[in-house]
Amino acid sequence: TPGSLQLMALCMLMAAAALTYHLLLGVAGMLSFGHALYFGAGVYGLAIILDRTGLPLLPAMALTLVVVIVLANLTGAVALRVTGIPFAMVTLAFAQAGSVMVRRNPEGATGGEEGLSLATEHVPSFLVGVANTRNLYWLALAALVVVFLVTAWIQRSRAGHVAAAVRENEMRVRVLGLQPYLAKLLIFVVAGTLAGVVGMTYLLLQSGAVPRAVSSDFTITLLVMVVLGGVGSRWGAVLGGVVYTLLDQRLTALANSDAIAGLPRILQIPLSEPMFILGTLFILVVLFLPGGLAGAAARLRSREAARRPQQILEEAG
């Protein structure tokens, strides 16, 4: 059904967004609180360009991509002058500035708290409307595949190896004569650019832009997805993005169900809040599955592999 396709497409886009954050945290060890700025730049940039210029979709996307790349380079060049918590605070400051600008609605460009609708007259008809949800589903899948392949390529590249080494010991990398700053800046810009691409696809899927796309809350959501799936694992980021999005959508229906309404008040109040349930699940994963969902799957595979020779010997005996 169109509703199911819409949900699956949203899951794939959130998985792709989590992959872009995986580049920052899982590869380079950079804890950013402002990654939503680049996702939001893709969402709002494309929406404003389509609304104000009348450009066709592909040229508008290309122009938006240039804007996102420039923004990522400028903010990354400043933020990477510091490391650790100061870096996280600088990225948060940039994201907050973007969020304030969106909510202030300069010259009516962003729509303020109401958001901005997609100018569908400049979008191909096969990407507009409920009847074409299947096409948007394939577009979301293509975005996820592209982001996954680029992420894998960057991780295996020389810059990815240098960034991983910087994550472990930056001083040793400097002693070897390498340049940690340039490697981290490259990872930062690629992650921001990919987030912008995902944001543009998200705009087409949702047919509009909302202020949450630029908020720090969205960055925290991406962080939770990566930790839930397993920090350092590409497939973990994908799994975390899909699982979190499904839970976020389905727990709302569960919280408003008759089953919850019939519980004693001491249970009804917390269980009627989806974020309470999500937060509890996240705490349980952190406590009992330190490697996330991907780490738990890897441990199960290793136990099965260790048990297999013993089974073969028992059968032979």
Image (tube, rainbow, N blue to C red):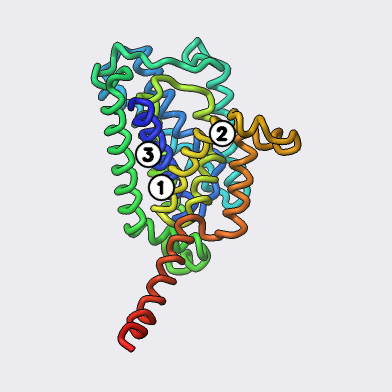
Q: Residues within 10 Å of mark 2 (few under 14, many from 20)?
A: some
Q: Position of residue 78 (x, y in %)?
A: 52, 41
Residue at which label 2 appears: 254
User: Can residue 180 be seen by looking at this rendering?
Assistant: no
Residue 268 to residue 81: above or below:
above
In primary-sequence order, the first of circles 2 and 3 is 3
Q: Position of residue 205 (x, y in %)?
A: 36, 26
Residue at which label 3 appears: 12
Q: CA distance from mark 3 to mark 1?
A: 8 Å
In primary-sequence order, the first of circles 1 and 2 is 1
Among the 4 quarters of the image, the one containing residue 275: top right
Instruction: Label 2, secondary structure: give it.
Output: helix
Residue 211: numbered disc: none
Q: Residues within 10 Å of mark 3 (few under 14, many from 20)?
A: many
Residue at which label 1 appears: 238
Residue 99 to residue 280: above or below:
above
Residue 257 to residue 129: above or below:
below
Q: CA distance from mark 1 to mark 2?
A: 24 Å
Relative to 33, is 201 on the left or the right?
Answer: left
- Residue positioned 34% across, 16% down in the render: 50
- Residue positioned 40% across, 66% down in the render: 301
The quarter of the picture where the N terminus appears is: top left
